[in-house]
Image (cartoon, grey):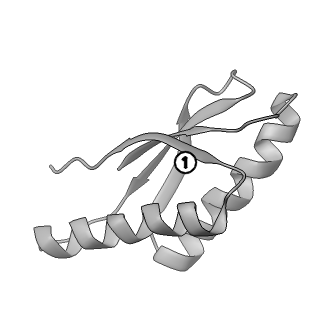
């Protein structure tokens, strides 16, 4: 899954990373997915987070990634999801 996030009011890269790092760590802990900031690393007010998991059941994976998106929406109201997409390989 690739998720583009807006961080309104963020004034520095340090402030951005102080908000993104806990999100990435919590996604790993709560959902056991591999997550990382994968793009827009030098932008202070938006970022792209990538989350991956391995499963042999397409329906389960899709439902699980939808839960990740809902978790971000519910627990990180300071971040706005601009766009997300789920890819399968």
Provide residue 86's location: percent of width, then percent of height. 27, 50
Provide residue 70's location: percent of width, then percent of height. 46, 67
Which residue in the structure is indicated by mark 1? 36
Tell how many labels: 1
Q: Which residue: 87% across, 28% down?
A: 11
Helix, strand or loop for disc 1: strand
Q: Which residue: 61% across, 57% down?
A: 24
Q: In which quadrant of the rendered view does residue 52 lie?
A: bottom left
- Taking 65 as reference, is 32 above or below it? below
Q: Viewed as shown, does residue 38 lie left or right of 66?
A: right
Q: Viewed as shown, does residue 87 lie left or right of 46?
A: left
The residue nearer to you, when weighing 19 against 34, is 19
The residue nearer to you, when weighing 81 against 65, is 81
Provide residue 62's location: percent of width, then percent of height. 23, 65
Q: Which residue: 34% across, 64% down?
A: 65
Q: Which residue: 43% across, 54% down?
A: 51
Q: Residue furthest top?
A: 42
Q: Viewed as shown, does residue 3 lie left or right of 85?
A: right
Q: In which quadrant of the rendered view does residue 23 lie?
A: bottom right
The residue nearer to you, when weighing 2 against 78, is 78
Q: Viewed as shown, does residue 53 lie left or right of 60?
A: right
Provide residue 3's location: percent of width, then percent of height. 45, 44
| Within-10-Å neighbours for mark 1: few <14, some 14–19, many 20+ | some
């Amino acid at each position: 899954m690739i998720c583009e996030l807006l961080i309104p009011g963020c004034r520095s890269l340090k402030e951005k990373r102080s908000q993104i790092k806990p999100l990435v760590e919590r996604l790993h802990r709560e959902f056991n997915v591999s997550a990382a900031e994968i793009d827009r690393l030098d932008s202070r007010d938006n970022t792209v987070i990538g989350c991956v998991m391995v499963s042999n059941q397409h329906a389960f994976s899709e439902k699980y990634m939808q839960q990740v998106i809902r978790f971000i929406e519910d627990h990180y109201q300071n971040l706005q999801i601009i766009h997300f997409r789920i890819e399968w390989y």
